[in-house]
Amino acid sequence: MKFTGPVLLVDDEPHIRKYVSLILKQMGITQIFEAGNGEDAVVAYQRDKPRLVLMDVNMPRIDGIQALRQLKEIDPDCCVIMLTSLTNRDTIQQALDLGAENYIRKDTPKEEIARALSETIAECFGSEDAPTNP
């Protein structure tokens, strides 16, 4: 069985959501929900029941760290990968300590983003569920 989603993609920048969506689609993931801030992410998580969440750190209303906290309260087993343009090691470590499975820098080349996503999906759901890299 291959991982096909659904995935919740959370970022306040529409062009980042579009870019990451294209990578996900190239990996065979077509069921993608989007949210533009942490508050909407929590609502969308409860409504859409995604298997994977890709979440920006810096967002309006509720940032990614606070949204991660809330998602883990709702579902301690949710698989969350943080997207960041930050190099602040404390913020990244805080996300990992709160239960994020991984973090990916937004300026990472497309092929490396796809590889990191595949590896993290394999860790969360088992290697037979991992999508193929584009």
Image: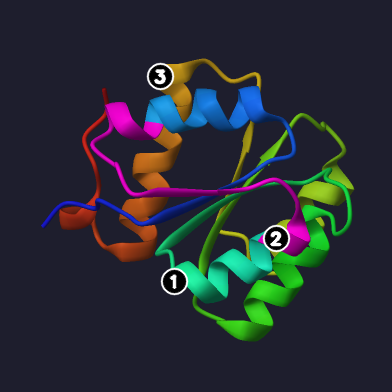
Which residue is label 1 attached to?
49
Kind of residue sitting beneath label 2: Asp
Percent position of residue 22, x then y: 41, 25
Q: Tell me the distance, in whole angstroms, between the alpha carbons under discs 2 and 1.
A: 13 Å
* Residue depicted at 67% across the width and 68% down the height: 42
* Residue depicted at 16% across the width and 51% down the height: 2
Q: Which mark is residue 111?
A: 3
* Earlier sequence position, callout 2 versus callout 1: 2
**Mark 3, secondary structure of its residue:** helix
Quadrant of the image occupied by residue 49: bottom left
* Residue depicted at 45% across the width and 32% down the height: 21
Q: Tell me the distance, in whole angstroms, between the alpha carbons under discs 1 and 3.
A: 27 Å
* Residue depicted at 65% across the width and 60% down the height: 41
Kind of residue sitting beneath label 3: Glu
Q: Is residue 123 above or below residue 49?
A: above
- Name the image colouring: rainbow
Quadrant of the image occupied by residue 87: top right
Q: Is residue 128 above or below residue 26?
A: below
Kind of residue sitting beneath label 1: Lys
Q: Tell me the distance, in whole angstroms, between the alpha carbons under discs 2 and 3.
A: 29 Å
* Earlier sequence position, callout 2 versus callout 3: 2
Which residue is label 2 attached to?
40
- Residue at the outermost left position: 1
**Mark 1, secondary structure of its residue:** loop
Percent position of residue 62, x then y: 85, 59
Give whichever of 6, 90 is nearer the camera: 6
Considering the image in quadrants, where does the N terminus appear? bottom left
For the record, the magenta segment spans 24-40
